[in-house]
Image (cartoon, helix red, strand yellow):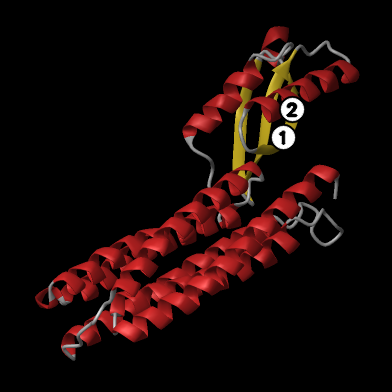
Amino acid sequence: MNSDNKNELRDGLRVTWVGIGVNIFLIVIKIYAGFLSKSQAMIADGVHSLSDLLSDFIVLLGLRWGRKVEDDSHQFGHARIETLSSMIIGLILIIVGAVLIYNAVMSIYNHSHANPTIFTIIIAFVAIVIKEAMYWYTLIVGKRIKSLALIGNAWHHRSDAMSSIAVLFGVLAAYLNPKWNLGDIFAALFVTYFIFKIGGRLLWNGLKEIIDTAPDKEIINQIFQFSSTSPGVREVHDIRARYFGGQILVELHVVVDPTLSVFEGHEIAAAVKYTVLNCVDDVARVIVHIDPDIKSQN
């Protein structure tokens, strides 16, 4: 592992450990406040933070193993371990959402009543600020080191922040007027919407990568344009690309003068490779096949 990879791993681990500490604090304080005030929304928010904590440990596993260099058993690297980590996070979110829906429905059926206090309201507000800060911190690091697992975890922090906003409105409504008690339960259901949305997105994105879905046409067009303008290239065709652990692997064919030497053809291929690597975001590997321009001989 080179120094850049070590620095990326260090940064990814640091932000994840910060997230673990934050989530442990929020789990304890939210669930305590929820039981103290009998707030379904606050308890649901605490459970959401518990799922955040689980996802943090999954991200640690993904970063530790997914950033390992190639070996004889994994000749293309271990990047899809991070992909698997992000999918597990998504599955956890969906399971958590299903549990929260059940609890909210049962609270309505049993006519449960919340008794929120100023303390509950303050906790909800503090959770919003902390989680929004963790979202931006984790997202910036995740994008910089191109980690799907970290980016997924950032959205997990954002969903927790959004859920805390719903909780804040729910407990505030119940605090201001006891007749608005259902606001607490509806806030819990609103939380669930964001949990399902983010969980589904993580699962879908991970699945697309596992089945080798190609990048957007815009990225394919960029690859075509930059490779076509490389010196010595007469034509570009058969571009293939797929995601691999948040990065893009590319294979393409370039047509060159058939009278060139092997060395000259190799130099053109190398120029195309480095042009695409340097000009197209997230491209990590490029394989260039050299084809002779047969038409020019006819």
Picture quarter with the C terminus: top right
Q: Is mark 2 on a helix, strand or loop?
A: helix
Question: Residue at image x 38%, y 72%?
Answer: 45
Mark found first going from the N terminus, 2 or 1 = 2
**Is 76 in front, or is 197?**
197
Alpha-carbon span between mark 2 and mark 1: 6 Å
Image spot of residue 188 (x, y percent)? 28, 72
Image spot of residue 90 (x, y percent)? 48, 65
When the figure is inspected, residue 260 is found, relative to residue 290, above or below; the finding is above
Based on the displayed image, in which of its 4 quarters is residue 198 positioned? bottom left
Based on the displayed image, in which of its 4 quarters is residue 261 positioned? top right
In this figure, which residue is indicated by the disc labeled 2? 273
Question: Residue at image x 69%, y 15%?
Answer: 230
Within-10-Å neighbours for mark 2: few <14, some 14–19, many 20+:
many
Q: Which amino acid does label 2 sit on?
A: Lys
Based on the displayed image, in which of its 4 quarters is residue 33 positioned? bottom left
Q: In this view, does 198 lie to the left or right of 236?
A: left
